[in-house]
Image: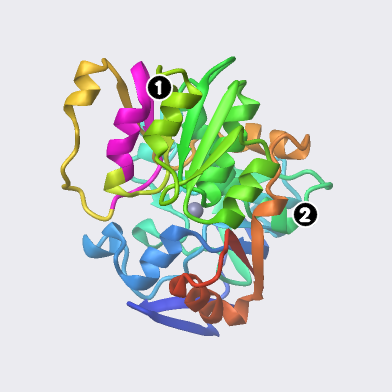
Amino acid sequence: MKAVRFTGPREVKYEDVEKPKIKSNEILIKVKAVGICGTDMELYSGEMPYIKKGLTKYPLIPGHEWSGEIVEVGSEVPRFSVGEKVTSDVSIGCGKCDMCKIGRYNLCPNRVVVGSYKNKDGAFAEYIKLPYRHVYRLPDSMSYEEAALIEPAATASYGVMKGDIDYGSTVLIIGDGPIGQLSMQCAKVAGASKVFIVGSWDEKLEIAKSTGADAVMHYKKDDVLDKINELTNGKGVDVVIESSGSPKAFNQSLEAVKPGGKVVLLSIYPTSEFMAQINSVVTKDADLIGVLASPNAFKPTIDLMESGRINVKPLISHKYELKDAEKAIKMIENKEECRLKAILIP
Ligand SMILES: [Zn+2]
Ligand SMILES: [Zn+2]
């Protein structure tokens, strides 16, 4: 089969690789659409912590935001059949350890991660195989392209769940990329009364407005903290979702959150060590919450997308054929064009 492999830092090859062979508990799926994520870009550049620590090695087939059609089902797989439209979790647990048993398979010590951790082959390919336990059936009404955004939407959903966003909450989202946009939509679904979003592209902030944001701010043109003060009558927001990965934004989160509020971190920072206004967490009696992947969030996310309450369509900004993956990656790397989600079609 054809696949795109990263063979070293900044080396992309479209080449023939062996088609995966399934075991009795696995499903073989023909990939129909796959999104390019920030994680794929870090794998490409070699800056991904898993690469630096040797937990993921080149060559590697990336891609974890995908959808496809079942072409083969293992002999012991129940409930699934050839021809069905599906996607899968990104964290694939062992199913046996203490973490897996309590449903926290994103923390399984034996886990692999699709398209990255421990070199589990991803979906920048014609076919992908997965254990059936982590596969989800999709509604007929959902296009494969929309379905490729289930994974980022599920990550946003998990962040909203962990942040306890609920009826009447006020929320600040930092970051106008796909995860920020989807967090904004998920916060509204969860019952937030007002959701504000800060970003760096006017075009993206317009999309946020059209999909439900109550106020948008540009991080260079607006004084974000002044505006938050104004919008919340000086109280601060109940929850901040920080999806930008900028140390400055992390500190801004601690200032914007109200006493007793929550700060949810949905991004990896370029460095583990930076100056943080950490005393604010203590003096505000605030909760600082980390989010890794999207365990148990796929089913509700798929249902909410089917009902139209999460709308991913405006977030698909670019489409390329799989063979042109390198072109797409270069476009993202150059940062000259405004983009949200670029999708590859095998
Ligand atoms: Zn992703
Ligand atoms: Zn496990």
* Residue in the image at 68% along x and 41% along y: 211
Residue 236: which numbered mark, if any? 1
Task: Name the amino acid, label 1.
Answer: Gly
Compared to residue 242, the image places residue 33 above or below, namely below
Q: Secondary structure at mark 1?
A: loop
Residue 133 forms part of the magenta stretch? no
The magenta stretch is: 249-269
Farthest residue to the right: give it: 141
The residues bearing labels 1 and 2 have C-alpha atoms spaced at a distance of: 39 Å
The quadrant in which the C terminus is found is bottom right
The earlier-in-sequence mark between 1 and 2 is: 2
Seen at 20% across and 19% down, the residue is 282
- In the rendered image, residue 141, in percent from the top left (x then y), is placed at 84, 47
The quarter of the image holding the N terminus is bottom right
Q: Is residue 251 magenta?
A: yes
In this figure, which colouring scheme has been used for the structure? Answer: rainbow
Q: Amino acid at mark 2?
A: Ser
Q: Residue drawn 28% across and 45% down?
A: 248
